Image (cartoon, rainbow, N blue to C red):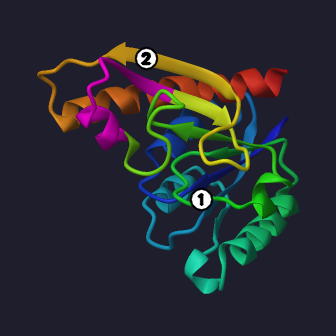
Amino acid sequence: MKKIVALFSGEGTNLANLIEKIHLKHGAIVCAITNNPEAGGIAKARTAHIPVEILDHRDYESREAYDAALVDLINDYNPDLVVLCGFMRILTSVFTSQVRAINLHPSLLPAFKGARAIERSFESDESVCGVSVHWVSEELDAGEIILQKSFTKNPKDTLEEFSAKIREIEHEILPLSVIKILKD
């Protein structure tokens, strides 16, 4: 069975979705790694009996030092694929040159790269918005697109309603992307 390492920083809703749709069906999530000791996703992984590693970025003097430790930790699990599902770190070439990873981003890339993508997309004049899954590359949110799905923005939606549509699409296309990659 193919091995996956999942990286997350927050509540772990996308991690929980991967556990439900992928874990032990299409691949095994052999470890979930977070940079946030308070992340809600820790409990979600442990409930599914997935080992959790907490690697707090605040314990490192630089992004490069953190990324080197992260790469070493990932390599301990020898995964076929690393999935960033809400991992809120800008990764350096120390990571991107050594790890085969995909990222979930809540916009139709190349639009709204980086932080606050949902809010910036919502506030924009764009009529079509969506979600992207892409390969992680040295340039932030610029790797080759694996899968995208869009929807037409409803001008009457609140930010909460808009965000819910984004999450729904994330929960659909991230597992599909992982399955596609593991099959190839």
- Given residues 22 and 178, the one toward you in this image is 178
Q: Residues within 10 Å of mark 2 (few under 14, many from 20)?
A: some
32 with respect to 168 (left or right): right
In this view, the residue farthest toward the front is: 125
175 with respect to 117 (left or right): right
Point 70% across, 43% down: residue: 136
Residue 5, position in %: x, y? 72, 50
Point 58% across, 76% down: residue: 56
Point 86% across, 63% down: residue: 76
The amino acid pointed to by label 2 is: Ser
- Picture quadrant where residue 164 is located: top left
Q: Pick the quarter of the image with the C terminus.
A: top right
44 with respect to 90 (left or right): left
Q: Residues within 10 Å of mark 1 (few under 14, many from 20)?
A: some
The amino acid pointed to by label 1 is: Ile
Residue 150, position in %: x, y? 43, 17
Q: Which residue is mark 1?
A: 90
> Residue 60 in magenta?
no
- Please say if 149 is above or below 103: above
Instruction: Label 1, secondary structure: give it.
Output: loop
Task: Report the span colored magenta.
Answer: 118-131
Q: Which residue is mark 2?
A: 150
- Given residues 155 and 86, the one toward you in this image is 155
64 with respect to 54 (left or right): right
> Residue 122 in magenta?
yes
Instruction: Label 2, secondary structure: give it.
Output: strand
- Picture quadrant where residue 120 is located: top left
Residue 57, position in %: x, y? 59, 75
- Please say if 61 is above or below 112: below
